[in-house]
Amino acid sequence: MPILNKPEQFGDLYIEVSIVLPSTVNKADIPKLQKIFPPKVLKYDESKISKVEMKQITQKEKRAKEEEDEGIRYGPGQHRHGENVQCAQQ
């Protein structure tokens, strides 16, 4: 979009839209809505699908994973606030 009083310059146009959806729908309106908004057909390649086995983890395994992730995120010896943790000399 051209900038006001500067025809040689252009900028971005942002439009903010607010949509209010009803909390209930009349049964007679459902076919009309389905015609306007057809269901989305999901397309995928069967050869790219891999099956995985889900397993429930224990709280101990969850904590260990979180601690491992925290170590990767902050680096060895560093914690959330950036302070370095050092062992005390004995």
Image (cartoon, rainbow, N blue to C red):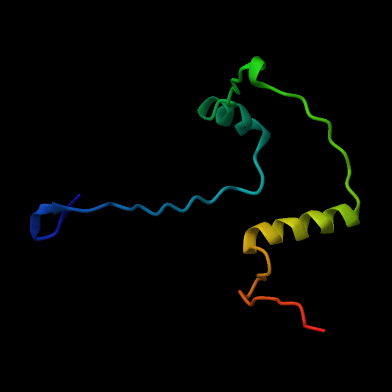
Q: Quadrant of the C terminus?
A: bottom right
**Where is residue 69 shown, x and y percent of the image?**
71, 56
Q: Which of 12 and 29 lies nearest the eye of the viewer?
A: 12
Q: Is residue 84 above or below residue 35?
A: below
Q: Which of 37 and 80 lies nearest the eye of the viewer?
A: 80
**Where is residue 40 shown, x and y percent of the image?**
58, 26
Which residue appears at 70% of the width and 61% of the height? 70
Q: Is residue 54 above or below residue 7?
A: above
**Where is residue 78 shown, x and y percent of the image?**
65, 70
Q: Quadrant of residue 75?
A: bottom right
Please give the count of numbered marks on the rendered protein.
Answer: 0
Which residue appears at 56% of the width and 28% of the height? 32
Give the residue at the far front of this rendering. 90
39 displayed left or right of 7: right
**Where is residue 39 shown, x and y percent of the image?**
59, 26
Q: Which of 25 and 87 lies nearest the eye of the viewer?
A: 87
Which residue appears at 90% of the width and 56% of the height? 60
Q: Which of 16 and 44 lies nearest the eye of the viewer?
A: 44
Which residue appears at 77% of the width and 60% of the height? 67
30 displayed left or right of 55: left
